[in-house]
Amino acid sequence: MKLNYKKQGSGQPIIILHGLFGMLDNWQSIANQLAENHEIWLVDQRNHGRSPHADEHTYNLMAADLQELITDHHIEKPLLVGHSMGGKTVMWFAQKYPDIARALVVVDMGIREYPIHHDGIIDALHSLKVEEISSRNEADEQLAKHISSFGIRQFLLKNLHRKKEGGFEWKFNLPVLEAAMEDIVHALPDGNVDTPALFIAGGASNYITAADVPEIMAQFTNAEVEVIPDAGHWVHAEKPEEVTKMIERMAAK
């Protein structure tokens, strides 16, 4: 699949993948900083942003999409950065296509299977009749009945697109993502990875716990885990300076 991307800067390549219900714009502020010294590729994963929609949504396919992007654009030894679902994609990629990435930065995502925990968000998205609303403020008011967090609502509403013929639609492919949820929370397959890897955990998040670290280190034999205190799951949005410095450190290896 030909993914939508935004390229900026020059130098050593860094490819950044967003998480579930996200888009490449989520990483724009960090990309602007990194682009001072690096060639940055911000990517919309399949069924998200401006990338094509498809009936299947698996990590095998997302890893193959990433490989196609790297091959098509002759990207040599990129540093791969991924948050949440994007983090699982880059891990999967390193297993399936060894020796292509020079290093990985995995932001708040472990290797284990996670319980399906997006039901509340999906129910809220279904409750919003996007074809009937007249403004983003109206959309926010409707979502607020189901999602109390302003930050999560704003994150989701970035995906609301006004159609030329009037009305709104979601940029992400909600029916397919909902159907694929068991695949999205799936554990990484067995198989060691010796690519240098940095796992960044949010201290206030439960995606990477102390109990997860030994299993991560056993499967990623050249990995380290860093915890950013007081950060939740959206570590890069809450602590952009710390995350940027950590990515720069991995890029310098």
Image (cartoon, rainbow, N blue to C red):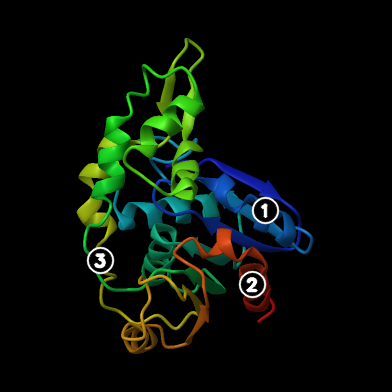
Q: Nearer the viewer, residue 60 or 86?
A: 86
Where residue 34 appears, as percent x and y from the top left, is: 71, 62
The residues tagged by marks 3 and 2 sit, at their Cα atoms, a distance apart of 26 Å
Residue, x 44% and y 83% (percent of image)?
194
95 lies above or below 161:
below
For marks 3 and 1 on the same chain, the one whose residue lies earlier in the sequence: 1
Please identify the quadrant where the N terminus is shown.
top left
Query: In the image, what residue type sits under mark 3?
Result: Tyr
What residue would you read off at disc 1?
29
Residue 103 circle label: none
Q: Secondary structure at mark 2?
A: helix
What residue would you read off at disc 3?
114
Q: Nearer the viewer, residue 119 or 181?
A: 119
Residue 242 circle label: 2
Where residue 65 appears, as percent x and y from the top left, is: 42, 50
Asked whether the residues under the numbered discs 1 and 2 touch, taking CB atoms below 8 Å apart as contact, a structural biologist would say no
Density class for disc 1 (Cα within 10 Å; few <14, some 14-19, many ≥20) is: some
Residue, x 54% and y 65% (percent of image)?
80
Density class for disc 2 (Cα within 10 Å; few <14, some 14-19, many ≥20) is: few
Residue, x 39% and y 47% (percent of image)?
148
Where residue 177 appears, as percent x and y from the top left, is: 29, 43
Q: Nearer the viewer, residue 212 or 10?
A: 212
For marks 3 and 2 on the same chain, the one whose residue lies earlier in the sequence: 3
